[in-house]
Image (tube, rainbow, N blue to C red):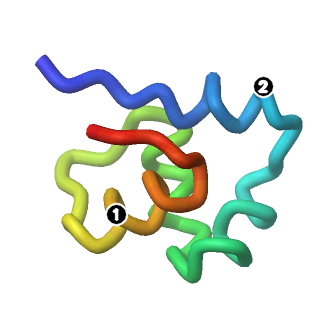
Amino acid sequence: MIKCHLSRMMGERKLKVADVARATGVHRNTISALYYERASRIDIGVIDALCEFFECKV
């Protein structure tokens, strides 16, 4: 099972959805869907952009 820790990572850094969207170029709706764990699929480019921003690996 794949678990998304975006909300935890954003909370630790006190980031808002808009902050992450602006910094990564990923649409706000996509960030929100991942934040609230409603996303049913995710593009590899989005994963790459988020991992680069948060300096993490999959």
Circle 1: residue type: Asp
Name the secondary structure under disc 2. Answer: helix
As measured in the structure, the alpha-carbon distance from the residue carrying label 2 to the one carrying label 1 is: 20 Å
Occupied quadrant, residue 43? bottom left
Task: Identify the residue under disc 1.
Answer: 48
**Quadrant into which the N terminus falls:** top left
Q: How far across and how far down the image is residue 35, in percent?
A: 54, 40
Q: Estimate the x, y position of residue 19 in percent, counting from the top left.
A: 79, 63
User: Is 26 above or below relative to 50?
Assistant: below
* Residue 18 on image: x %, y %: 77, 65
- The kind of residue on which mark 2 rests is Glu
Camera-nearest residue between 4 and 39: 4
Left or right: 41 as drawn, with respect to 37: left
Density class for disc 1 (Cα within 10 Å; few <14, some 14-19, many ≥20) is some
**Residue 12 numbered mark, or none:** 2
Q: Residues within 10 Å of mark 2 (few under 14, many from 20)?
A: few
In the image, what residue occupies the spot 30% across and 22% down?
A: 3
Q: Is residue 19 left or right of residue 34?
A: right
Quarter of the image where the C terminus is located = top left
Q: Earlier in the sequence, mark 2 or mark 1?
A: 2
Q: Which mark is drawn over residue 32?
A: none
Q: Residue at x 41, y 33 (%)?
A: 37
Question: Is disc 1 placed on a helix, strand or loop?
Answer: helix
